[in-house]
């Protein structure tokens, strides 16, 4: 039986992955990790019986021990080291990285070093460390299987086309809840408004990222690493209903697309069982009801999330880390109600202009830059 470790098991991707695993019943869950939400973790432990679990800190580990004292033989760990252990030191063949943020960088690198295939949802990891991860995966003969719906769509469009050059990637975007709004209107939007995504139900951080278009920016950078294309070879296309999950144009002009209802279980399942296509319950597209699919262009002036990302990607070095870490910090403050929507952009701009740039971005530079960016924003006037 194939064995899997699920990092971030209590989150939006983590719970949907466990529902896929439950539906097929032929994957052994070796490890589960989360930061908080111990009651859900406890349920998951009782159902899937992992050998290793990891929680955020020692206090949570003690509480969990109190809750599940009757399960012998299960290892409970916590924090940074615990996460690395759950990712790399179990018998899992495959690791699903469904934690949020660049805290995923180190466990992902360790899992690859241990020879485990990666089902990658955690885009912040590739954005900041893709230049380390992709060559390392190649060296270790490890597969990086995309879970992000757009990247899964692109990956699906590439099947059977080995050896054919990609002319262009057409990365689709819903535009988020604020598509069409003016900058003036954005001055008044609230956290509650930002958390209302039109098509997808996701974790809070990515939902806010979708409303700023930073998510699409992160996805553009993610795609350069996953598919070896340049920034210029990626065009973002607004497709408000999220029916086309992305497209690939080849040199003969053929455009391949992957379509489906907005349901993350499909890309999750494709990554877990690649290259097999197993059955999946749920709604199907009905073109008689759908009738039309419309397209638009992104408004990069009002929503600079995308242009910041391109700028960070062009500059290279530690700039994608500065961009990503500033966004993680700013979104954290926005979720706490401490800054306004537009201040997210101000913080990112300010960090990209002021945190020291480094051409080299080895792992220690990436982690250092993350701390420097946090430190800078804590003291900066924008907050
Ligand atoms: P979420 O907030 O719903 O869940 C995050 C999970 O990670 C939880 O289990 C949480 O306990 C854990 N976690 C959070 N911070 C942690 C930390 N510091 N240390 C250890 N564990 C921590 O997030 P999500 O929406 O499931 O997203 C997960 C990742 O997948 C993100 O990188 C996101 O961009 C990406 N993604 C999500 C979706 C989606 O539909 N939700 C789609 C595409 C990509
Ligand atoms: Mg996506």
Image (cartoon, helix red, strand yellow):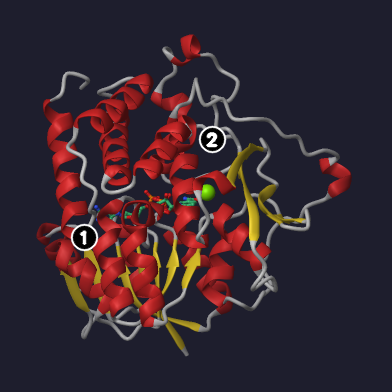
- Residue 294: in sight, yes or no? yes
Q: Quadrant of the C terminus?
A: top left
Q: Comparing marks 1 and 2, which lies closer to the viewer?
A: 1
* Closer-to-camera residue (71/160): 160
Q: Which of the two labelled residues, at mark 1 and mark 2, occupies the earlier sequence position?
A: 2
- Which residue has dot 1 on it? 363
Q: Is residue 40 above or below residue 319?
A: below
Q: Residue furthest top?
A: 184
- What residue appears at the point 40 percent right and 33 percent down from the top-left corner? 308
How far is disc 1 from disc 2 in space, using C-alphas? 34 Å
Please give left or right for residue 246 compared with residue 216 in the image.
right
Residue bearing mark 2:
197
- Marks 1 and 2 in Cβ contact (< 8 Å): no
Q: Residue 351 appears at what percent x and percent y? A: 24, 31
In the image, is the residue at mark 2 within 8 Å of ligand 1 by its beta carbon? no
Q: Which mark is residue 192?
A: none
**Are there few (<14), some (14-19), or many (20+) residues within 10 Å of tag 2?**
some
Which element is circle 2 on? loop
Mark 1, ligand 1, within 8 Å: the answer is no
Residue 52 screen position, x and y as percent: 26, 77
Q: Please name the residue shown 27% across and 36% down the image.
A: 326
On the rendered structure, is 328 left or right of 235?
Answer: left
């Amino acid at each position: 039986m194939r064995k899997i470790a699920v990092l971030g098991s209590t989150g939006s991707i983590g719970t949907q992955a466990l529902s896929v695993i439950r539906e097929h019943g032929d994957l052994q869950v070796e490890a589960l990790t989360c930061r908080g939400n111990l009651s859900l973790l406890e349920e998951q432990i009782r159902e899937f019986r992992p050998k290793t679990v990891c929680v955020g800190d020692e206090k949570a580990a003690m509480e969990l021990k109190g809750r599940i004292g009757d399960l012998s033989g299960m290892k409970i760990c916590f924090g940074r080291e615990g996460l690395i252990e759950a990712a790399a030191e179990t018998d899992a063949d495959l690791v699903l990285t469904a934690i949020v943020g660049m805290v995923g960088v180190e466990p992902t690198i360790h899992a690859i070093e241990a020879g485990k295939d990666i089902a990658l949802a955690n885009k912040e990891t590739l954005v900041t460390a893709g230049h380390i991860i992709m060559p390392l995966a190649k060296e270790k003969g490890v597969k990086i299987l995309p879970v992000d719906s757009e990247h899964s769509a692109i990956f699906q469009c590439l099947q059977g086309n080995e050896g054919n050059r990609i002319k262009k990637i057409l990365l689709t975007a819903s535009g988020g809840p604020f598509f069409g709004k003016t900058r003036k209107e954005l001055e008044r939007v609230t956290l509650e408004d930002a958390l209302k995504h039109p098509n997808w139900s996701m974790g809070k951080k990515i939902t806010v990222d979708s409303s700023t278009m930073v998510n699409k920016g992160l996805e553009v950078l993610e795609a350069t690493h996953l598919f070896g294309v340049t920034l210029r070879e990626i065009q973002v296309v607004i497709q408000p209903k999220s029916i086309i999950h992305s497209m690939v144009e080849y040199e003969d002009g053929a455009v391949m697309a992957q379509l489906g209802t907005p349901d993350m279980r499909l890309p999750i399942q494709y990554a877990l069982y690649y290259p097999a296509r197993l059955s999946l319950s749920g709604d199907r597209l009905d073109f008689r009801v759908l009738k039309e699919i419309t397209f638009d262009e992104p408004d990069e002036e009002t929503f600079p999330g995308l242009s910041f990302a391109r700028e960070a990607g062009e500059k290279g070095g530690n700039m994608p880390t500065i961009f990503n870490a500033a966004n993680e910090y700013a979104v954290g403050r926005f979720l706490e109600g401490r800054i306004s929507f537009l201040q997210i952009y101000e913080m990112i701009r300010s960090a990209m202009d002021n945190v020291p740039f480094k051409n080299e971005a080895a792992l220690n530079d990436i982690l250092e830059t993350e701390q420097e960016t946090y430190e800078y924003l804590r003291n900066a006037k924008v907050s």
